[in-house]
């Protein structure tokens, strides 16, 4: 098998758009399955995880192989929910073309527009698939208008609907001028006919509009069209092929997975418009110098290379690394090299995938997507090479920063014992999840891209690995500081029969600018405190500042100066001066106008223009400050700083406010004075005591 015969086709779209149903219909028409499954029944090829069956939508990337007219395809169904978008973006690194599912009864979502934008930037040809025209609220013209508005680019209409809503029966193809009529009985049978007379004028108008757009591919074709007002079928196909492969065109077709409608024609058009020369060949590589990034030509290399784009955990086989062979070939028993980990890997077994099913294979060639079991030192986004003699690393997308955190605990001691190994497996499958040990607040934090993602992880731990975990809103890491100056003496004197304890120091405290932390100043003169005890004073202050005088939170951004003291030749000790410094701290800080600081988060929120006012108002109600906005394709990026306590669970709230038409990122910004009632802030540690 050669690269020319392999196409990797990704199915993209928002949650609930019908991607999995469309994938099922493609596999059915490609004879990869004998009958179609149903999302509602939980028996589709692509949504095979228990959590996907329960929730009725895709949460993980899945792959299935099928053949279409002597060509080999890998169909890749991607997760749609916003919290799992990184999985989709990682998968987009290995696809040759995308099918963007666009329900004809819904507006284009911000998520879909983002995916289309990322595909275009990556040079991935994408074809729009308008579905749901059989629904009562299906509206083809409105869908086209919305696509043009949201994408900022007029789509190339290749088909128009035949019938509307309850009378929808198929489509008329403008490329070959034929009617494709379906009985709407879910059999997928089609009758190909001539265009009915009552549609002739509408079809001709639509065809001329298509040709006008197609002719824009180059000046010669534009000039010919302006002169003759027509193009030959050969010219039309060549222009469509060039425009699709170069991402200049966004062609749209009509299909419905539920009725197996339009599937064959859609696949024919993908095959026709996706020439061999346009199959994925735009990887960039780095050979060890971060500044030296060059293009990789897979057609010019016979040496093996591959990009791992996903890791799955099989109950019996352990880790399965899904990779695209980017050059050369891979065989069972081969030894390959991972430049990132500087280790060799032995290929024990290769598999092609059909959802959860693994199909044995002895070899994988350029363009293939294959699963490899039990790699020891290789992870998602790693590159594999033939050997260490000519190593390189493919440039891949960066892992996003977490936008939400929850405290995670085990439900029982038994669960706690298994928690570590289970989390390791779950994080191998989803590298955007992070575990953070918060030693200050004595909590383990689970961080990720959204509440749905983290809840799904807990659900998987319970149902797949039989480990009970709980998520709770984490404690906020407040801080304390001072706004004034003060000084105090700390004198520790203890006599108990034997050697006593004696330490005496005077300190002055004053505020420092935000972000300066803690500064210790030694102003002792005349040896009133011996030099060997000065570090003891500093050590005592460092320990004491861990507990503020108002609410028990660490104190930051202040200077402590030791300027006087006394000692005892026999009884003074390191420990005595540490205690004395702590006593001085506890006396001085209440007199220095102490305040509580709360953490603020920096947010960037993408919303459509008509929702900007809604988000401004919501941020204001959360004591947030909008610091500006930036126009971008289809909307605005709002930049704001908000108290952390107000946005601990902001992701689901934001989704509700925007009906899911948003994306955002959030990171720690700074601390600011808390201006509310101190009684609203819990004392540090009191929640653990309850």
Image (cartoon, rainbow, N blue to C red):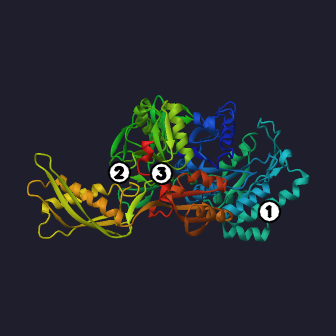
Is residue 149 or residue 475 the one in the foreground? 475
Specify whether residue 28 is in view: yes
CA distance separating discs 1 and 3:
39 Å
Q: Report which residue position mark 3 lands on.
A: 298
Q: Report the disc number at residue 208.
A: 1
Mark 2 crowdedness (10 Å alpha carbons): few <14, some 14-19, many ≥20: few
Mark 1 crowdedness (10 Å alpha carbons): few <14, some 14-19, many ≥20: some
Tell me which corner region of the image, top left, top right, bottom left or bottom right, holds residue 216.
bottom right
Seen as rendered, the residue at the extreme left is 569
Label 1–label 2 contact, CB within 8 A: no
| Quadrant position of the C terminus in the picture | top left
Residue 518, horizontal then vertical, whole percent: 31, 63
In the displayed structure image, the side of residue 263 where residue 61 appears, left or right: left
Q: Report the disc number at residue 595.
A: none
Q: Earlier in the sequence, mark 1 or mark 3?
A: 1
Residue 485, horizontal then vertical, whole percent: 33, 70
Classify 550 as above or below 224: above
Classify 346 as above or below 595: above
Query: Which element carries disc 2, helix, strand or loop?
Result: loop
Seen as rendered, the residue at the extreme right is 198
Is residue 428 or residue 612 the one in the foreground? 612
Tell me which corner region of the image, top left, top right, bottom left or bottom right, holds residue 375.
top left
Query: Which element carries disc 1, helix, strand or loop?
Result: helix
Q: Earlier in the sequence, mark 1 or mark 2?
A: 1
Label 3–label 2 contact, CB within 8 A: no
Residue 577, horizontal then vertical, whole percent: 19, 57
In the displayed structure image, the side of residue 231 where residue 411 appears, left or right: left
Specify whether residue 95 is in view: no
CA distance separating discs 3 and 2:
15 Å
Q: Report which residue position mark 2 lands on.
A: 390
């Amino acid at each position: 098998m050669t690269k020319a015969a392999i196409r990797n086709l990704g199915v993209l779209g928002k949650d609930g758009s019908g991607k999995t149903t469309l994938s099922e219909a493609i596999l059915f028409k490609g004879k990869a399955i004998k009958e179609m499954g149903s999302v509602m029944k939980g028996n589709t090829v692509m949504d095979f995880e228990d959590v996907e069956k329960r929730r009725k939508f895709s949460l993980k990337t899945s792959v299935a192989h099928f053949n279409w007219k002597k060509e080999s395809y890998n169909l890749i169904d991607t997760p749609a929910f916003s919290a799992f978008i990184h999985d989709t973006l990682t998968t987009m690194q290995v696809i040759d073309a995308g099918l963007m599912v666009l329900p004809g009864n819904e507006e284009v979502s911000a998520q879909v527009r983002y995916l289309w934008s990322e595909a275009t930037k990556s040079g991935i040809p994408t074809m729009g698939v308008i579905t749901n025209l059989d629904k009562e609220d299906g509206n083809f013209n409105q869908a086209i208008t919305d696509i043009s508005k949201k994408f900022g680019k007029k789509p190339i209409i290749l088909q128009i609907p035949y019938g509307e809503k309850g009378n929808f029966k198929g489509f008329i193809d403008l490329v070959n001028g034929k009617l494709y009529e379906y009985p709407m009985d879910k059999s997928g049978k089609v009758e190909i006919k001539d265009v009915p007379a009552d549609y002739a004028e509408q079809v001709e108008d639509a065809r001329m509009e298509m040709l006008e757009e197609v002719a824009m591919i180059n000046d010669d074709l534009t000039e010919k069209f302006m002169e003759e007002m027509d193009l030959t079928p050969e010219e039309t196909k060549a222009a469509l092929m060039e425009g699709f492969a170069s991402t200049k065109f966004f062609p749209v077709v009509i299909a419905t997975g539920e009725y197996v409608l339009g599937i064959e024609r859609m696949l024919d058009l993908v095959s026709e418009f996706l020439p061999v020369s346009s199959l994925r060949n735009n990887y960039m590589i780095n050979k060890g110098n971060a500044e030296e990034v060059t293009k990789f030509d897979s057609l010019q290399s016979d040496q093996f290379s591959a990009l791992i784009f996903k890791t799955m955990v099989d109950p019996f086989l352990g880790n399965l690394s899904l990779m695209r062979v980017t050059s050369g070939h891979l065989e069972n028993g081969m030894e390959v090299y991972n430049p990132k980990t500087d280790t060799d890997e032995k290929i024990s077994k290769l598999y092609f995938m059909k959802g959860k099913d693994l199909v044995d294979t002895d070899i994988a060639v350029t363009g293939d997507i294959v699963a490899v079991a039990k790699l020891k030192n290789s992870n998602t986004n790693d590159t594999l090479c033939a050997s260490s003699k000519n190593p390189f690393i493919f440039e891949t997308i960066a892992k996003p920063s977490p936008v939400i955190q929850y405290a995670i605990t085990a439900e029982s001691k038994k669960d706690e014992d298994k928690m570590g190994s289970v989390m390791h497996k779950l994080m191998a499958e989803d590298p955007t999840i992070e575990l953070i040990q918060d030693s200050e607040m004595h909590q383990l934090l689970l961080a990720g891209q959204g509440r749905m993602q983290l809840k799904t992880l807990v659900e998987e731990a319970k149902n797949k690995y039989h480990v009970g975990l709980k998520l709770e809103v984490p404690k906020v890491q407040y801080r304390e500081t001072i706004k004034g100056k003060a000084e105090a003496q700390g004198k520790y004197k203890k006599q108990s029969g034997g050697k006593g304890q004696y330490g005496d120091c005077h300190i002055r405290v004053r505020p420092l600018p935000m972000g300066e932390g803690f500064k210790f100043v030694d102003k002792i003169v005349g040896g009133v405190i011996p030099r060997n005890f000065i570090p003891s004073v500093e050590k005592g202050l460092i320990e004491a500042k861990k507990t503020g005088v108002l609410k028990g939170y660490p104190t930051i951004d202040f200077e402590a100066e030791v300027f006087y003291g006394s000692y005892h030749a026999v009884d003074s000790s390191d420990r005595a001066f540490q205690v004395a410094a702590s006593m001085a701290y506890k006396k001085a800080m209440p007199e220095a106008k102490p305040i509580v600081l709360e953490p603020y988060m920096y947010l960037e929120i993408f919303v459509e223009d008509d929702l900007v006012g809604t988000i401004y108002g919501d941020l204001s109600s959360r004591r947030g400050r909008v610091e500006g906005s930036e126009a971008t394709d289809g909307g605005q990026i709002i930049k704001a700083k908000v108290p952390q306590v107000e946005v601990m669970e902001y992701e689901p709230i934001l989704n509700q406010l925007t009906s899911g038409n948003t994306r955002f990122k959030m990171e720690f910004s700074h601390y600011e004075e808390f201006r509310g009632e101190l009684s609203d802030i819990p004392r540090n540690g009191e929640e653990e005591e309850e």
